[in-house]
Image (spheres, helix red, strand yellow):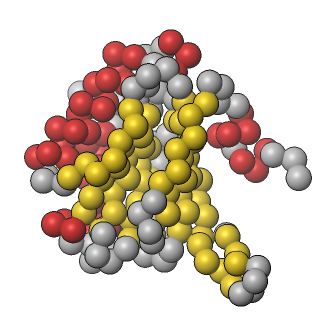
Amino acid sequence: MVYNRTKNQLELYQCFIQPGQLAFSRDPSLICSVCGNGVLIVLRDRIKKIGGVAHCVFHKRERNAKPSNYHVDNAIYSLLRSLSSMNAAKHHLEAQLYGGGAYLGRNEKRAGKVVNRVRKILKRLDIKIVSEDVGGSLGRKIAFNTKSGETIVFKTRKVRKTDWKPEMVRR
């Protein structure tokens, strides 16, 4: 949780997601994640000021694999259903994309397929991509504010274990 000390009140809930997870909120929230080769898909209803993030790593699932949010199709539609349950309007949605790089020189082809698949699905759904930072060889750390729609992107040459598990940071 993020507090405003001068007003002594809660301003934002804070959530950290890992690959294969998604998070969404009706309440003002800061959704954070770290990605190397994966892709972070941000969807937000710009009128209702609600949104969410999905972190996926595969462009499609294998024939016999269980559906999961590791896969683009499942992740996008799961996030859409979640936002719809909070009365988000599809025609008010906007998207942001982050990640999909060849972090540490690996998985460039797979990452590119993930980004292309996301773009294709969003285009089919008529959801405009308003911001993206994809490709390259650096990892990314993001913090998305569901209320304002603002996203902070930090690029990093090294994704550390503590980046994936913030609770490991010693205080």
Placement of 25 over or under 120, stated as above or below: below
Could you tell me which residue is drawn at 28 percent across and 76 percent down? 47
| Camera-side residue of 20 and 3 | 3
Could you tell me which residue is drawn at 67 percent across and 70 percent down? 2
| Camera-side residue of 70 and 147 | 147
Residue 79 rendering spot, x and y as whole percentages = 33, 57
Relative to 146, is 158 on the left or the right? right
Residue 123 rendering spot, x and y as whole percentages = 14, 45
Residue 103 rendering spot, x and y as whole percentages = 52, 21
Could you tell me which residue is drawn at 45 percent across and 71 percent down? 147
Relative to 25, is 4 on the left or the right? right
| Residue 18, image quadrant | top right
Q: Quadrant of the N terminus?
A: bottom right
Residue 34 rendering spot, x and y as whole percentages = 56, 40
**From this viewpoint, which residue is outermost toward the right?**
171
User: Can residue 157 be spotted in the picture?
Assistant: yes
Could you tell me which residue is drawn at 30 percent across and 69 percent down? 46
Relative to 113, is 146 on the left or the right? right
Q: How many marks?
A: 0
User: Can residue 64 be spotted in the picture?
Assistant: no
| Camera-side residue of 91 and 25 | 91
**From this viewpoint, which residue is outermost toward the front?**
6
